[in-house]
Image (cartoon, rainbow, N blue to C red):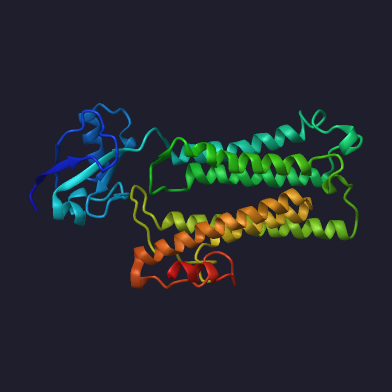
Amino acid sequence: MASSMTLRVTTPAGKKPIRKLPSNIEIGAGTTVEEAKRIIARHTGMRDYHRIAIVDTTTKSIIKDRLSILAQNPGVQATGDIAVKDLGPQVSWRTVYVVEYAGPIFLSLLLAYPLRAYIYPSALFGPPTPFSTIQTISLALIVLHFIKRELETVFLHRFSAATMPTSYIFRNLAYYWLSMLNIAYWVFAPNAAAASPLKEGRDTYVVAAGLAVYLFGELANFNTHVILANLRPKGTTKRGIPKGFGFGIVACPNYLFELVSWIGVLLVTRSFATGGFCVVAWLWMQRWAVGREKRYRKEFGKAYKPHLYPMTPGWALPIRKAKE
């Protein structure tokens, strides 16, 4: 392969051309997609090169692997062309997750302490009551869950994509912030089931069971995240076939164990709000798991053993649909 090559640069059909977009660029044999974006950004004067998407003109799809060698892309080799479009303002995935998980921590603490005396009208919720033992435990479980998520985001997770559209942050924040606001509001209410004093006997057993389920889910979820992080060498976007605890049962045990930990919270809080969140979370994660299992099949080919269950043991129908 030549030490350098000239690529023709076009704009995808129907897209607004980027101002000052060059008609061609010079790249080296080892130039990555990300480096090519930087070159284009310098030509156009665009400050954030993450806004730039390089499109394979043969498949009409964005070349997503930012660390792949652009000259080795089959479409680029076949045509010597790339198409370039502006994705709009971008924000890093890590930033989104940090903000996304910080909200539930602060909202839960606000509703549990400084705001609790003002947000529950006596006519609807009865007279004020002290924050109960079960409510304190519930608060601790929610806060600890999201602290764990924050620490994983900062120190553990490795992202294949550097950024997402800034507009998506509002969608992501709405899901977690509003869900946790709803749970906290009803669980910390003076007349909530969790407001009752912890009694010896059945209450104690249910709370203990919830704590055990929660702890198992959190530890198993963390273990899965460690496995997934180790599959992707630092500084790369490549990943290996996931194996280990849970992967022999479902394709995405991280989602399964996430749900398990929230079932533990449900047992402790005994709240319809928590139950509703579990159902919605299961539906979303089941959908994500189906998509990820399909990507595993496409990415790893025959080396990957297809899973009958994407996330939920016994729930095979979505996978069958995905195969068709």
Q: Quadrant of residue 88?
A: top left
Would residue 94 appear left or right of 85 to someone viewing this image? right
> Compared with residue 158, is residue 126 higher up or lower down, i.e. above or below?
above
- Residue 174 position within the rendered picture, expressed as x and y whole percent measured from the top left: 59, 39
Residue at 46% across, 57% down? 228
Residue at image point 36% right, 53% down: 233
Left or right: residue 70 compared with residue 112: left
Q: Which one is nearer the viewer's eye here, 243 or 87?
A: 87
Count of numbered tags: 0
The x, y position of residue 106, in whole percent, is 66, 34
Asked if residue 118 is positioned above or below residue 203 in the image, the reply reads above
**Picture quarter with the C terminus:** bottom left
The image quarter in which residue 91 lies: top left
Whether residue 128 is visible, yes or no, is: no
Residue 271 coordinates in the image, percent (x, y): 77, 50
Asked if residue 90 lies left or right of residue 35, the reply is right
Image point 45% across, 60% down: which residue?
292
Please provide percent x and percent y for residue 92: 43, 38
The furthest residue to the left: 2
Viewer-proximal residue among 297 and 217: 297
Which residue is nearer to you in this view: 268 or 8?
Answer: 8
Q: Is residue 298 visible?
A: yes
Closer to us: 228 or 167: 167
View extreme (front): residue: 14
